[in-house]
Amino acid sequence: MIKVLANDGISSQGVLKLKENGFEVLTEKIKQEDLIENINNKNIEVLLVRSATKVRKDIIDSCPNLKIIGRGGVGMDNIDVDYAREKGKHIINTPAASSNSVAELVFAHLFGMVRFLFASNRQMPMEGDSKFKELKKSFSSGKELSGKTLGIIGFGKIGQEVAKKAIGLGMKVLAHDKFSKDTDITIHFFNGDKKTFNIEINDLTTVLKESDFITVHVPKTDKKAIIGANEIGLMKTGAGIINTSRGGVIDETALMFSLDKEKLAYASLDVFEDEPNPSIHLLMHNAISLSPHIGAATNEAQDRIGIELADQIITIYK
Ligand code: NAD
């Protein structure tokens, strides 16, 4: 029986699908330093990881029978992908499985932001019984999303899912992408209807200047932040910005400065430069809605990740 080690976990649906197709699935976590020994002794042919387990040259070189390395999720920074491919290993991941979950988190933050839920949830437990009227007043300049312009920077898988939801809410969408051209997106409705929209790709300056909210969905590069002080300077006063892509894509210092100066009204961050120890100044900031990198962390996304990995493994062995 071919053995699959899912070292950072895998959904029960993924396990079921693999088992149904004759694979043995091991899910007990093995420490990084014991991986090589275990993979060889147990003759594991498929190693599945999320972000915690690292698959570097040492494992690739020392485990000749390892055939497939799979990443449940998108980024493969924890795997020496090119080296593994040179050595003949199959590398698989699940780039689309979590797009909808990340897109929904964008709106969780957006709705929370425009009604100050992030702040009222912090203050109500402390002062809700003694200063109800004061709190009501301080959170009463809420905004509706409907009718506003959402600027989407990076119009790939997640950016396009965000656009569909924004259109559904009656928002105007402005997209920027460095590499893609105008893109058709199709929204499917509950009754089987569907509608296709052609989304024009604009230059970055236009999107920054004309949007009420900016959401960023680009990959992390080693270069400087895509949104720094200059880019924030172009945005509307009172706008909001959301980062669910990768920490550092928005310059955190420039962001805090712009919030302190009330150039931007609010920001939402799911990702941070210094994960897992984000800047305490960001965490304490009263205009930032926060979540601890949970964009893909839904049951549905985890199920899809497990099933997509299982499907790919089954196909490779066929
Ligand atoms: P994708 O590759 O489908 O799309 C990225 C898009 O960005 C591409 O269209 C690309 O052309 C564009 N792009 C690249 N560099 C750019 C630049 N400098 N300026 C403008 N556009 C640029 O990727 P995706 O699946 O949509 O993921 C987007 C981001 O979300 C990634 O950084 C990914 O790591 C992150 N992500 C976060 C979570 C989370 O838990 N918060 C979960 C999944 C993905």
Image: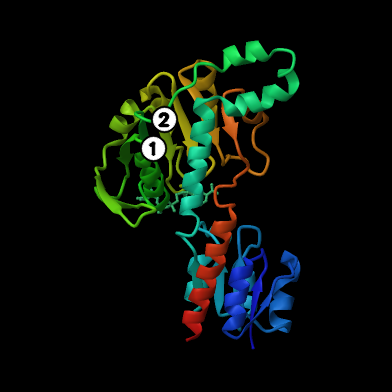
Q: Closest to the observer: 12 or 281?
A: 12
Q: Quadrant of residue 24?
A: bottom right
Tell me the CA gap for discs 2 and 1. 7 Å
- The residue identified by callout 2 is 145
What residue is drawn where x is 54% and y is 41%? 247
Does residue 250 appear anywhere in the picture?
A: no
143 relative to 66, above or below: above
132 relative to 178, above or below: above
Q: Are marks 2 and 1 in contact (CB under 8 Å)?
A: yes
Q: Secondary structure at mark 1?
A: loop
Q: Secondary structure at mark 2?
A: loop
Percent x, y of residue 57:
59, 69
Q: Quadrant of the N terminus?
A: bottom right
Q: Residues within 10 Å of mark 2 (few under 14, many from 20)?
A: some
Q: Amino acid at mark 2?
A: Leu
- The residue identified by callout 1 is 169
* Color encoding of the figure: rainbow
Residue 5 is left or right of residue 230, and the answer is right
Q: Closest to the observer: 57 or 316?
A: 316
What residue is drawn where x is 68% and y is 40%? 277
What residue is drawn where x is 44% and y is 30%? 228
Q: Is mark 2 within 8 Å of ligand 1?
A: no
Q: Quadrant of residue 216?
A: top left
Percent x, y of residue 124:
69, 22
Percent x, y of residue 193:
31, 54
194 relative to 304, above or below: above
Q: Closest to the observer: 208 or 81?
A: 208
Label 2 or label 1, whichever comes before in sequence order: 2
Q: Quadrant of residue 77?
A: bottom right
181 relative to 109, above or below: below
Residue 158 is left or right of residue 292, and the answer is left
